[in-house]
Image (cartoon, grey):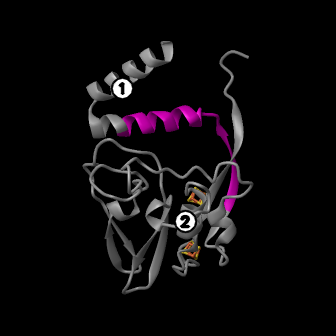
Amino acid sequence: MKGEQKKKIVKTIKVNIDKCNGCRVCEMICSAFHAEPKYSSSNPARARIRVIRDPLSDKFVPVFAGAYTIAQCAVRDKYTIGGKEYDQCAFCRASCPSREDFKEPDSGLPLKCDRCEGEEEPLCVKWCYVDALTCEEKEEEVIDEKLEDMEIGVDALVEKYGLEKVKDIVARLSQSKKG
Ligand code: SF4
Ligand code: SF4
């Protein structure tokens, strides 16, 4: 029906930092799942989850990769956990031009958590034996995630190579497809 919002059940991941012991199994399994071919290697720099550590208080904070941002933010709030201050960048989910977190180390393209597409349960949740990560289901409006991911990828290419170069490549590709 026109105007009707489509809804679906989405699994979100809840983080309990009081349970996290910093084992980093979540980083390992995530990077292995996203290796090409799958499980052929494990490099936490390719993981869509990062465990931020405060060595003094021994607190660990798992942070998931969220959407790509084309600009660094103007606000740098401070977070205080266990009496220790962290700047906002450490906990930001975005792949941001001003820092290296959540960027594919070879290509520099942004990484985003895809909830382990195709798997029944997010693998970081499945492999977190202390339940610092758990799944929660909630109803959300449907957005076209494939289109959103495509936009993120194109944004990153434009940021890296410039709009004109990307337009040239698309024009050349469309010519070669026609021919
Ligand atoms: S697997 Fe669980 S306990 Fe280990 S670092 Fe990740 S969130 Fe923390
Ligand atoms: S849900 Fe999957 S893709 Fe997302 S951080 Fe966990 S292991 Fe990585």
The residue carrying mark 1 is 169
The residue carrying mark 2 is 41
- Quadrant (top left, top right, bottom left, bottom right) of the N terminus: top right
Name the residue at 38% across, 18% down.
Answer: 171
- Looking at the rendering, the stretch of residues picked out in magenta corresponds to 135-156
Q: Is residue 54 above or below residue 40?
A: below
> Is 138 a magenta residue?
yes
The location of residue 11, given as percent across then percent down, is 67, 52
Q: Quadrant of residue 28?
A: bottom right
Name the residue at 33% across, 60% down.
Answer: 89
Q: Earlier in the sequence, mark 1 or mark 2?
A: 2
Q: CA distance from mark 1 to mark 2?
A: 31 Å
Q: Is residue 12 left or right of residue 91?
A: right
Query: Under tag 2, what secondary structure?
Result: loop
Looking at the rendered structure, which numbered label has been put on residue 128? none
The location of residue 68, given as percent across then percent down, is 41, 45
Q: Is residue 133 left or right of residue 102?
A: right
Name the residue at 49% across, 34% down.
Answer: 150
Q: Is residue 168 above or below residue 139?
A: above
The location of residue 44, given as percent across then percent down, is 47, 67
> Is 78 a magenta residue?
no
- Locate ligand 2 by image quadrant: bottom right
Residue type at numbered disc 1: Ile
For the residue pair 133 and 37, the one nearer the viewer reads as 37
Residue type at numbered disc 2: Ser
Mark 1 nearby-residue class (10 Å; few <14, some 14–19, many ≥20): few
Query: Under tag 1, what secondary structure?
Result: helix
The location of residue 158, given as percent across then percent down, is 32, 34
For the residue pair 59 and 163, the one nearer the viewer reads as 163
